[in-house]
Image (cartoon, grey):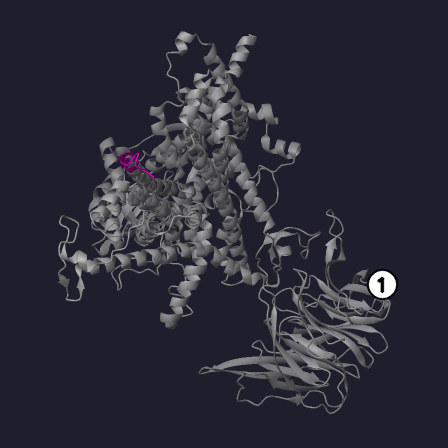
Amino acid sequence: MNVPPFTPTPALQGEPPSGRGSFPNSTLVGGLFSRRQIRSITDGFTGFIIKTGGIGIILCILGMCVFLVKEVIPLFQPSRATSTESISLSAPKTTSTTVLIGIDEQQELAYVLRDGSLEFVFLAGATPATQEIPSRTLVTDESVTAVTRALGKGHYLAVGTEDGRIIPVAIEFTHEFRGNDRLISPSVTVGTPIMAAPTPQPITKMAYQRTESDVRIAALLQDQHLWLTTSRTTSRPDGTAAASITQVDLTPTIPGRITALTLGSRAEILAVGTAEGNLHHLDVAEPARPVLVETTRASEQGKAITALAYLMGDRSLIVGHESGELSVWTPVREHPGTNKTHMAPIHRFAAHQSAVTDITISQRDKGFITTDTGGEIRLHHSTSEQTLLTLTPQQGGLRNTYFSPKADGLVSVTEDNRLIHYHIANPYPEITWATLFSPVWYEGYDQPKLVWQSSSGSDDFEPKFSLTPLIFGTIKGTVYAVLLAVPLAVLAAIYTAMFMHPNLRAKIKPTIEIMAALPTVVLGFLAGLWFAPVLERNFPAMTGMVLVLPLVIAVAAGFYLILPASFRHRIRPGVEALLMMPIIVAVVWGCLETNAWWESFLFDGHYKPWLESHLGLNYDQRNAVVVGVAMGFAIIPIIYSISEEALSNVPKNLIAGSLALGATRWQTLAHLVLISASPGIFSALMIGFGRAVGETMIVLMATGNTPIMDWSLFNGFRTLSANIAVEIPEAPQGGTLYRTLFLAGLLLFMATFALNTAAELIRQRLRSKYSQF
Amino acid sequence: MKLWMKHFFGSGELFIWGCGAGLSLSLLMIGGLLVLILLNGFGYFWPADLVELTLKDGKHVIGQLAGEEVSPKGIPRIRMKIGNRDLYGLDYRWINSDQIIERAKPSDLVMVERREWGNFYGRLGTLHKEDQVVAEGSDAVWQSLPPLLRHQESSETESVYTLRIVDANGKEKSVSLSQVIRVLRPNDLSTLEKLRVYIGNVWTVLTTEPREANTEGGIFPAIFGTVMMVIIMSVVVTPFGVISALYLREYARQGVIVRTVRIAVNNLAGVPSIVFGVFGLGFFVYGVGGTIDALWFSERLPTPTFGTGGILWASLTLALLTVPVVIVATEEGLAAVPREYREGSIGLGATKWETIWKVVLPTALPGILTGLILAMARAAGEVAPLMLTGVVKLAPAMPIDGTWPFLHLDRKFMHLGFHIYDVGFQSPNVEAAKPMVYVTTLVLILVVVTLNLTGIVLRNRMRRKYAGSAV
């Protein structure tokens, strides 16, 4: 209804209409506006407020979806690397053959170790400490033939020399705050040299690792002998420490020319790659007795292994080949019955164009950086099996590359002695559509699996973010709830709308409506703490009840029909439901009383072993049946109300016509009412479905919340909604888990929104159809 | 016979009975649920008689009967609430009926309500003042206790009194009188006196703070938190809902867009509450709250002030959750205002706003109120979104207190629904906590059902009043 706007005209001012609600005179108010003008302004102003406010509020409400999307999008954004200026390093005295580079946590101070001389380089934005930077020569007399770093946290380097000595070097960065400035000062500790082998020989390759008590070195010498050296420090009672050295020649156990080797970060395992593409896996936990665990052919074509590194956690091994192939291997059980494992490739990455030269692992997650001889740097993530970044800083090879301790940057030294530095934005490497919804081969699993396990006690844990088990749980809970609720609710609605006495109907409808408002936390509590134990105790009786109840109802109805007509007519029509009540109560009571009999009759005396042996099902106390009943309870009212509305809105003249033509009550229902109202009932079903999908408290309280995928009636599950409630308090803002949970929320939002919209459209069509009559 | 069969199935009478059975089953389920909650909830307050059992092995058990059943092995047994958690470790005990020689209800059995360790069931021993015995013997102590307990709060000497209580088998336990809340002899009380105790118990639960990890004491902070939150939510949701409804019904041009918006708003009511919680956490708590902290409370960072869950964010989240309810109900109310009213008003020369303000809104008020009440009922029962936006199991301080600015919107709060979840599922001693959960459930259901009934009655009345004129 559009009201024409008031435009005060002088003509009107002269002859004001009289009476209440009108404007009797045109006295100037405040000398500026006439009363009429003020009213007009007020009207326009409020109109404006309501319009903008209304639109604003509605946009805000609908903006919820946009916000959820906005929070989820970063998960799928590609990683970015921003390069900062490259820095020229001081020209080396001789052409250096060995190079190692590293950087501190804050990416402010880098160090470069070239041929035994260590140089520190400040990167942009760093505040140098007042102390002098130790830029110094660590090894003077002999030439350095090999350098390496220990895997894992900290900067522990080792320098191998021509005469077979290995010099451990530890670099530490200390940060101190002076006012608002953060000062970095590095310190360098050079350890006592250790001989890599009994006879001095140039070291060509080595792997170095240190633990609290041990220093372990695997060194390949010029004569192609591989020596494992362990220097164990034991503290004597008098407080001094003594080092004992154990040396073992590993060459006999490893055939072939060794091209790559690496020690795990706990120094308990050693992997050796050969020119023939064989991978040897050794257990070196006992220094004196290394054991060759297995030899695997890592390359079908016999391509040489050129780079090896253990991923964080030492469980999987990254293998890089001469041909540029790159794969991640992990021990996999041969078959479920044994503990015997063999190495198997679980992830393969797009191959480099040239030989892989270097692998640096992340100290934060399952990511790693590889470089090749062509000078390409790639960032990969093992779990999600994706190559996140490919960087080609310049033509020509790279000497050494290092992944920063917080996995947010990398530094590299080029052939022409320049230092290049990238900042990497790579916050969600473990998430792809595939890891969210498809099976993923996780470390320690025998095959690709769908698993949700967001956290664990250890740091090197591989998070498993598969939403599929949660979606499965959601569907499972919903299906069981709907299976219980739909028959009951629809039958009840049919009865209320079609057959019930109107007086009774006026009382029963509000009762069920109030039930719709029952807080679900109450249902969840009763389901979990009352119904679950009751069901566990009386499971056989409940099964019996399900079998007996329909039968008894049929018999009771038959009995009523064969009663003499004179007696039958004394009962008002439309009270069948009331007559049914005592019968149902009697059946329920009777079944509960005869629980023991049912147990011996149906389940040979003990139902749990019976279920286990006959159906292979394990009975959990909080299971899908409990949830189905509780959630069914929660959605019965809504399905009931909407179906009842649809049924009772079927035009009365149609029903009267049908009955007048001689159809029975049932025929009218089955052939007319049900068919016309079926879209409405269907929409009720969808709305009920939508409710059950998002229900949180009931599933949270009445299931064990274990994210397993199993249709069994007798075990629990975890739904998307319960998962959000369980996990989000521990999810740091903006983290992978946080955003994944937002994605779960978005999925729920979209699913329910779609279901409800469809239901609403069906109802509207139905209404317009009925309005024709 | 054949004819009968035909009649039986053909006429469909069987199916009608089936439908009836469906309805009765639904009703019985609802009824059973309510009876279960009412019995357990109201039963909690009743000072049940204390029973002393003499067992075959000569031992005695004192406690309250808590149920009887036939054990899985077919032996009838009874469940006793034996209390004395500090002595036995358990609150409940099963006793096989064939072990019991005698059941008695001696009048000198006492129930000592303590601040810690739950109730003690037994007999009074002696009362000490420092090292001196003040009273000895069950009756003497019983006589001397009431004045001491009455002045408990005011006197400072109360801690010098120690009460010695004896359990069923003569084991003694000393309790400082400051730890004793109340001493009762339930077996000595007449029904009328018990009724008085009963009402007192109800009052205590409704008005006192929880004890013992929420499993005992009262639920006042939870009630207060729930009410506070619902009030703040209503203050927010009413203007927003009404303005939106006014826009949709009175100002917007009715067309495809408005119809779509209406469906969308309607459907928002069906979006799971946990999604609103997620949104509230991301948008209100971290987004808006984080910004407020950065702007005005930066000196307290990194300890968040508004950047963490609190009653304001919880209320706003629930306001968002319930705004569709208010919009829909208000729209219904606006649509039900007879056309003649508006035409009359405009015909008399009122502006559009004047018509809305003076005629339409007053007439639609019952509709708006209905929407608001239904929204409040929904908000009072919702738990999932609160768990993400500021509810806690034990709030150290109320959202309103005597320190400036009196209303602390950034504080965390307690909530009846969350209390149920927390006490029932997170507490270490679920068995002992169950009665408390039933009481909380009862209170919550009473609140929700009362609100809903009011809403439904209002709505039905309004529908009847404007029947026929509805659009």
The answer to which of B304 and A655 lies nearer the viewer is: A655
Q: Quadrant of the C terminus of chain B?
A: top left
Residue A313, horizontal then vertical, whole percent: 65, 63
Task: Please report the residue visible at 41 percent of the width from the left and 57 percent of the height from the top.
Answer: A60
Q: Which amino acid type is marked by label 1?
A: Gln
Relative to A25, does residue A274 appear above or below in the rendering?
below
Q: Is residue B464 magenta?
A: yes
Label 1 chain ID: A
Relative to A671, does residue B308 appear above or below in the rendering?
below
Judge whether residue A182 can be spotted in this image.
Answer: yes
Q: Number of labelled discs?
A: 1
Residue A276, horizontal then vertical, whole percent: 85, 67
Q: Which residues are magenta?
A: B461-471
Outermost residue on the bottom side: it is A93
The answer to which of B445 and B442 lies nearer the viewer is: B445
Task: Read off the residue under disc 1.
Answer: A301
Q: Quadrant of residue A302?
A: bottom right
Q: Quadrant of the N terminus of chain B?
A: top right
The answer to which of A60 and A554 lies nearer the viewer is: A60
Residue A540, horizontal then vertical, whole percent: 55, 28
The answer to which of A482 and A399 lies nearer the viewer is: A482
